[in-house]
């Protein structure tokens, strides 16, 4: 497997990948889709560029089987502004038709190692509170619910919630 920081020419493919995994429906959806309770896209090209520009210490890591191969996944990692010894991990995405290959585990482990190599002692992430299966998946990988909750952003930026949503915070000691 090849892990590498994303570069500008890959951004369009990353946006398509993230939207298919997070908001895909029917045969296009993976097991992590949010389409049942959030309408609209998860990300667009302008917001991805803006997010990266506003977070100079963040990196969006990509996953491929081989150099030059198709994009299979991505994950966002950055120092957590709220916790000096922690890094935030988000937007963990695997192409829906590849989600049975345990690539999510590999990409998660790589994101954690990337943060650890840069001084992180723990990794924090947020998950929509309704996503019991995904929360359990992270718990099996050593993450624990902290008891913290964060509001889901209102507006079009991350899609339009069909009901009241919030994030739960999970954390793992490295």
Image (cartoon, grey):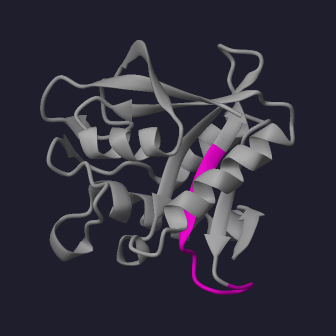
Relative to 1, say whether 93 is above or below.
above
Is residue 70 a member of the stretch shown in magenta?
yes
Judge whether residue 141 can be spotted in this image: yes
**Screen quadrant of the C terminus:** top right
Residue that appears at 40% across and 70% down: 99
Determine the residue located farthest toward the right in the rendered image. Answer: 118
Q: Is residue 153 visible?
A: no
Of residue 59 and residue 89, the one placed in the foreground of this image is 89
* Residue at figure coordinates x 64%, y 82% from the top left: 65
Residue 116 in percent (x, y) is at: 80, 39
Q: Position of residue 109 (x, y in %)?
A: 65, 53
Q: Quadrant of residue 97?
A: bottom left
Q: How many marks?
A: 0
Q: Main secondary structure of the magenta part?
A: loop
Q: Is residue 55 above or below residue 85?
A: below
Which residue is depicted at the point 65% across and 64% down?
62
Q: Is residue 169 left or right of residue 22?
A: right
* Image vertical order of residue 93 relative to residue 124, above or below: below
Q: Position of residue 82 (x, y in %)?
A: 65, 13
Q: Quadrant of residue 87?
A: top right
Is 45 in front, or is 140? 140
Q: Residue at x 14, y 48 (%)?
A: 36
Rendered image quadrant of residue 173: top right
Q: Is residue 159 highlighted in magenta?
A: no
34 horizontally vs 126: left or right? left
Residue 52 percent across, percent down from the top left: 68, 43
The span shown in magenta is 66-76
Camera-nearest residue between 28 and 173: 173
Q: Quadrant of the N terminus?
A: bottom right
């Amino acid at each position: 497997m090849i892990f590498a920081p994303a570069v500008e020419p890959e951004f369009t493919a990353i946006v398509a990948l993230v939207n298919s995994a997070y908001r895909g429906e029917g045969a296009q959806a993976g097991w992590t889709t949010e389409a049942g309770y959030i309408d609209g896209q998860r990300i667009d090209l302008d917001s991805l560029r803006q997010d990266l520009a506003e977070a100079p210490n963040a990196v969006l890591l990509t996953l491929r089987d081989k150099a030059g191969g198709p994009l299979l996944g991505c994950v966002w990692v950055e120092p957590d502004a709220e916790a000096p010894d922690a890094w935030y991990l988000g937007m963990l995405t695997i192409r829906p038709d590849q989600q049975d290959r345990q690539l999510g585990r590999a990409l998660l482990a790589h994101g954690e190692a990337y943060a650890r190599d840069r001084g992180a002692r723990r990794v924090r992430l947020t998950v929509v509170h309704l996503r019991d299966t995904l929360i359990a998946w992270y718990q099996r990988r050593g993450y624990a619910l902290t008891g913290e909750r964060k509001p889901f952003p209102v507006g079009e930026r991350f899609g339009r919630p069909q009901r009241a949503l919030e994030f739960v915070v999970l954390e793992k000691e490295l």
